[in-house]
DNA sequence: TAAATGAGAGAGAACGTTCTCTCTTTTTTG
DNA sequence: CAAAAAAGAGAGAACGTTCTCTCTCATTTA
């Protein structure tokens, strides 16, 4: 008696889960409705990002975002409870993209090559405006905007700290491994090297060299010099 | 008849110009009134800077600035025609402080020492909050704020470009001199080195290491490594 | 038909700015 | 030098606009 409903639900999951008209509670999670909701949220986020790039977090109004999304305020507020929530979501997405590049850092056994590559990947990803519209320095603008906001908005600060902490950990792990392999001078302060590299990488992303006519390849020796200078790698055949 | 008034003014200039109660048109420039006006402008700018550090250019309201300055809107608008004008003035002042450090760059004949020193000076000046109140990363906040604003505000962009152009010129001149002295590998791309150094310096200032517990001295080897890596100086007694 | 979705007017607060008025200081006049 | 006139400085209410967000009501979807 009590357990009559449960087998029914279970049956529905296995039988109708892929249907167009789900009739059970999983519909909320996987049905057409849910898919539409996600699409709308995406639409809003894309529009908001364009507006924030154009006018800044504080400078862009909800009306501007609504227009860009082709949506009424009533509709938009069905998907996001506040402007703040949109800001936080966009800050999180943007910083996550950064940290994902680091997470896939190659475990090459040449530490200088590894960080040169990761630096270039980072700049490539954050600088080149893959989608058509918008200014070529779109990502750099968003980067600075998020950093500025994180300095006076606790929620955004926490979001940044989360992803930047991950990035620092990742870098530190790779550096530590290289140190143990004897690739790096044991005297090197790894924490300082990580922090310095991160800060300088931010500086380079912020100024958006590719958008100013400096080709990506030109940055290769810059990152290499940075890596050599900060990590003081022992030469392949050390002379000591 | 027509020129009766004029000699009177001229006489006043030579006789009473240094008095407490000037009666001629130079009073407008050097009198008590003018001094008071400057003091008030200063008061407004200081208040506005605190507000902008706290809430950002767009986040701070004119009421907030008025309260901080202990002044009514009516009074404030007597000194600045708009919020925009205050923003521009503060952006200009902040960037000028940066460029002034570069302008006094020592003409040491050791290029690595020179840029290490200038880098440290820059961080010291921009990081340490000399005045008492406000967060310790006040200058870094303003730095990021100005950079963000410069990416979507043409007036602020022009102000930044002015001072940053001066800084680049100064650096380039020093580097060129060093190159001619044979201190730097002739192959080095000086323009790229200048741009990279500037970008990385901005990154370091932005992250405000001193405020995060990293002492200034710790940054000395970082700047040194940066200089060596980017400029590829020839060793005192080159081995080629 | 019941629930989900959206449009759009609009509420209410906050915004940057201006206006009017008062008080003080400076200059001119008799 | 005293009185009158002008100019400067500031306070604070009020302006029109714009802000974020809500509410009502129509339409679509299942």
Image (cartoon, coloured by chain):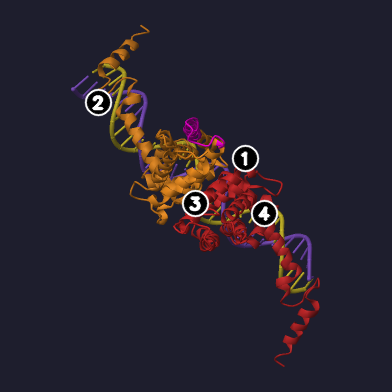
Chain colours: A red, B orange, C yellow, D purple
User: In the rendered structure, which segment of residues is drawn in magenta?
Assistant: B166-189
Q: How far apart are marks 1 and 2 (CA)?
A: 59 Å
Q: Name the residue under label 2.
A: B20
Label placed on residue A230: 3
Q: In this view, does B12 lie above or below B146?
A: above
Asked if marks 4 and 3 touch (Cβ < 8 Å), the reply is no
Instruction: Report x, y in % for residue A237.
Output: 54, 54
* Residue at 47% over, 47% down: B225
Reply above or below: A26 against B19.
below
Determine whether label 1 and label 4 are within 8 Å by CB.
Answer: no
Mark drawn on residue A46? 4
Q: From the viewer's perspective, is the residue at label 1 or at label 3 nearer?
A: 3
Q: In which quarter of the image is residue A42?
A: bottom right
Does the CB distance between marks 1 and 3 fall below 8 Å? Answer: no
Residue B117, percent across and down? 40, 41
Q: Of the residues tagged 1 and 4, which is closer to the observer? A: 1
Q: Mark 1 lies on which chain?
A: A
Sequence-wise, the earlier of marks 1 and 3 is 1
Q: Do labels 1 and 2 share a chain?
A: no
The circle drawn on residue A214 is 1
Please tell me whether mark 4 sits on a helix, a strand or a loop.
Answer: helix
The answer to whether residue B40 is visible is yes
Badge 4 density bin: few <14, some 14–19, many ≥20, Cα 10 Å: some
Q: Is mark 1 on a helix, strand or loop?
A: loop
Q: Is the magenta stretch mostly helix, strand or loop?
A: helix
**Viewer-side residue, A53 vs B57:** A53
For mark 3, does the 10 Å Cα neighbourhood hold few (<14), some (14 to 19), or many (20 or more) residues?
Answer: many
List the single residue furthest toward the top.
B1
Which residue occupies the foreground of this view, D6 or A139? A139
């Amino acid at each position: 008696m009590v357990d009559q409903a449960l087998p029914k639900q279970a049956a529905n999951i296995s039988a109708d889960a892929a249907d167009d008209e789900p009739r059970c509670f999983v519909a909320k999670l996987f049905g057409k409705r849910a898919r539409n909701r996600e699409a709308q949220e995406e639409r809003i986020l894309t529009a908001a990002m364009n507006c924030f790039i154009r006018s800044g977090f504080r400078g862009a109004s909800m009306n501007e975002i609504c227009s860009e999304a082709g949506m009424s305020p009533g509709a938009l507020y069905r998907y996001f409870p506040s402007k703040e929530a949109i800001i936080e979501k966009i800050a999180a997405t943007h910083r996550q993209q950064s940290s994902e590049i680091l997470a896939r850092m190659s475990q090459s056994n040449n530490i200088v090559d590894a960080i040169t590559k990761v630096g270039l990947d980072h700049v490539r990803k954050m600088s080149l405006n893959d989608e058509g519209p918008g200014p070529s320095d779109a990502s750099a603008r968003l980067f600075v905007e998020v950093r500025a906001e994180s300095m006076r908005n606790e929620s955004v600060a926490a979001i940044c700290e989360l992803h930047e902490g991950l990035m620092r950990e990742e870098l530190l792990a790779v550096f530590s491994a290289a140190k143990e392999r004897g690739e790096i001078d044991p005297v090197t302060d790894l924490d300082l090297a990580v922090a310095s590299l991160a800060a300088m990488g931010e500086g380079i992303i912020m100024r958006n060299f590719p958008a100013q006519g400096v080709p990506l390849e030109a940055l290769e020796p810059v990152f290499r010099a940075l890596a050599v200078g900060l990590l003081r790698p022992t030469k392949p055949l050390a002379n000591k």
